[in-house]
DNA sequence: CGGTTTGGTTTTATAATGAAACCGAAGCGA
DNA sequence: TCGCTTCGGTTTCATTATAAAACCAAACCG
């Protein structure tokens, strides 16, 4: 693959996010973490991911500050992987992906998991809005670029 | 790599979305498409992606119904790649990624591109809400699973 | 204690990616 | 209209990422 290009220097915040969580497994691990999983074996079983790859991804996610490795029990060796505050800020990303999938990737009558508020059971969703609260679509928005250094 | 696992059958809508746009380049292409790019050469130059890979990704995105290949001019050969209505529904995903990047992947004073409403210049953002409009965080939400067939 | 589970690491095979060369067709200036 | 250039790929080849399986030490469990 010859050194996959890093997007760290990109001025686009989406690109930088993808640099951190844009690979094939990372977001699935994060999804499971949101779902309450913490242990290596849980992720491995849930995802069917090769163990060496899982090791690598967990390491990367910890380095990125999205997960933290918390020592379990009193000993020193075994750890739990928990979402950090930063990791929890990926929640809207997960919900957005879920919403897209629900709309376009399921047959109308097909079974699917649902995301609801714990207390009330109400459905959870999200919309893009202006800072004063009006919902808008892609055509009403523009990206203001940073001037290129040249 | 031995046949990368498909998530098509997964009951989790996020997983299915990732199956479609979860690879390294697809969302970057979509980002550029939201930014107005339509031509092969534009994507290629903007992303620095290898041409064979770009060919493949565009093909996949067209097959998934996210982009459509519109013949250019009157001739038959050359095409423009445009977001379909389905593709435009990825807008919240892009905004969510952008918002995460803005919060955590830039130094406080660092330059970044911004997403604003075209008419007013107001910032664009998004929050997760219940269907009755209350903003909630990850801890207030639960995933209701589909019962496993076993 | 002794066996089993957990959480990895190592090894090896193969698929995905990237870079570069190549190529036909469309555009374009003279 | 001729010839040159750009565009939009395809092909080939080298390299990397991923997967599967074997292996292993430490923790846990009776």
Image (cartoon, coloured by chain):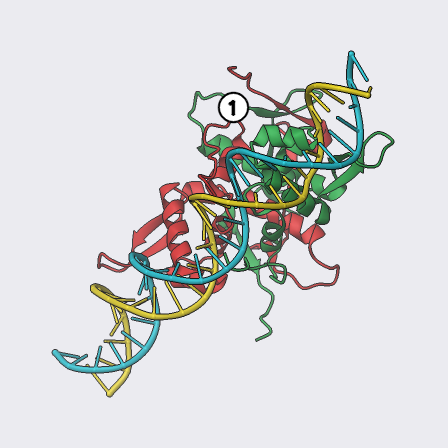
Chain colours: A green, B red, C yellow, D cyan
Which of the chains bears the disc numbered 1? A
Label 1: element kind: loop
Dividing the picture into quadrants, the one containing residue A67 is top right
Residue B118 appears in view: no
Residue drawn at x 63%, y 22% as measured from the top left? A122
Q: Which residue is mark 1?
A: A112
Task: Looking at the picture, tell me which residue is in the foreground, A60 or B26.
Answer: A60
Query: Above or below — where is A108 with respect to B77?
Result: above
Residue A107 point in image, percent of width and height: 42, 26
Query: Above or below — where is A78 with respect to D16?
Result: above
Dividing the picture into quadrants, the one containing residue A33 is top right
Residue B114 appears in view: yes
Left or right: A19 in relation to B81: right
Residue drawn at x 34%, y 56% as measured from the top left? B80
Residue B87 point in image, percent of width and height: 44, 44
Count of marks placed on residues = 1
Left or right: B55 in relation to A121: left
Task: Looking at the picture, tell me which residue is in the foreground, A49 or B99.
Answer: A49
Residue placed farthest to the right in the image?
A74
Residue drawn at x 71%, y 21% as measured from the top left? A119
Task: Looking at the picture, tell me which residue is in the foreground, B53 or D17.
Answer: D17
């Amino acid at each position: 693959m010859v050194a996959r290009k890093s997007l760290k220097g990109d001025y686009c915040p989406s690109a930088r996010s993808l640099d951190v969580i844009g690979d094939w497994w990372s977001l699935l691990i994060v999804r499971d973490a949101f779902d309450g999983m913490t242990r290596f074996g849980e992720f491995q079983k849930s995802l069917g991911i090769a163990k060496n790859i899982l090791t690598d991804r967990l390491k990367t996610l910890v380095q990125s500050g999205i997960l933290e490795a918390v020592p379990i029990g009193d000993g020193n060796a075994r750890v739990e992987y928990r979402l950090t505050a930063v990791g929890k800020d990926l929640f809207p990303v997960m919900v957005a992906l879920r919403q897209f999938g629900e709309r376009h990737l399921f047959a109308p009558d097909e079974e699917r998991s649902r995301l609801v508020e714990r207390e009330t059971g109400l459905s959870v969703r999200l919309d893009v809005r202006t800072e004063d609260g009006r919902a808008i679509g892609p055509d009403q928005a523009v990206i203001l670029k940073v001037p290129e250094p040249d």
